Image: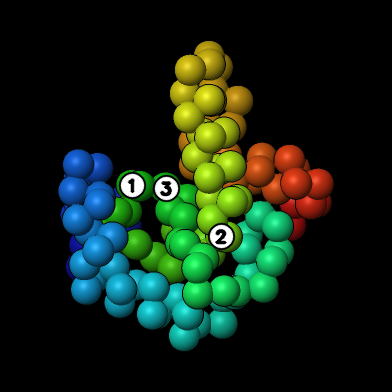
Amino acid sequence: MSSPGMATVSRAGYYEYIRSDAWRAVRRRYLQSKLPKHCAVCLKPWENSFVFHHKTYKNLGCERLMDIAPVCRPCHELIHKLDHHSKSMSPKPYGGLWGALKHARRVVNRPQQ
């Protein structure tokens, strides 16, 4: 495993990676940790249909647990819509994936923590 900030997976290899044993191990480590087990946006309790959202891709392949957040599928779609919309704007209003997640919290009327 590499140092944080040194992605070992390219963005092009992302979909292969999230189907890999290595990614399943990261998910398992998160679920066994004491980190929150609810949607990081709407606070819905954990369900098996949740996904882990990467707050950043800079550590892809050597994620720290704080680089990912569990989210329900509707909130995950919202985060990526906000991030995609933000990429067409200058200056970028949300500042990437982590910023889009924080903005999604405001969109669903949940105060930031």
The quarter in which the N terminus is drawn is bottom left
Crowding around mark 1 (Cα neighbors within 10 Å: few <14, some 14 to 19, many 20+) is: some
Separation of disc 3 and disc 2 at Cα? Answer: 15 Å
SS under mark 3:
loop
What percent of the width, then of the height, locates residue 17? Answer: 22, 58
SS under mark 2:
strand
Q: Is residue 19 in view from this perspective?
A: yes
Q: Which residue is mark 3?
A: 56
Label 3 or label 2, whichever comes before in sequence order: 3
Is 35 displayed left or right of 55 in the figure?
right
At 53% from the left and 45% from the top, the residue drawn is: 77
Separation of disc 1 and disc 3 at Cα? Answer: 6 Å
Q: Which residue is mark 1?
A: 58
Q: Which residue is mark 2?
A: 71
* Between marks 3 and 2 in the image, the one whose residue lies nearer the viewer: 2
Compared with 3, 55 (above or below) is above
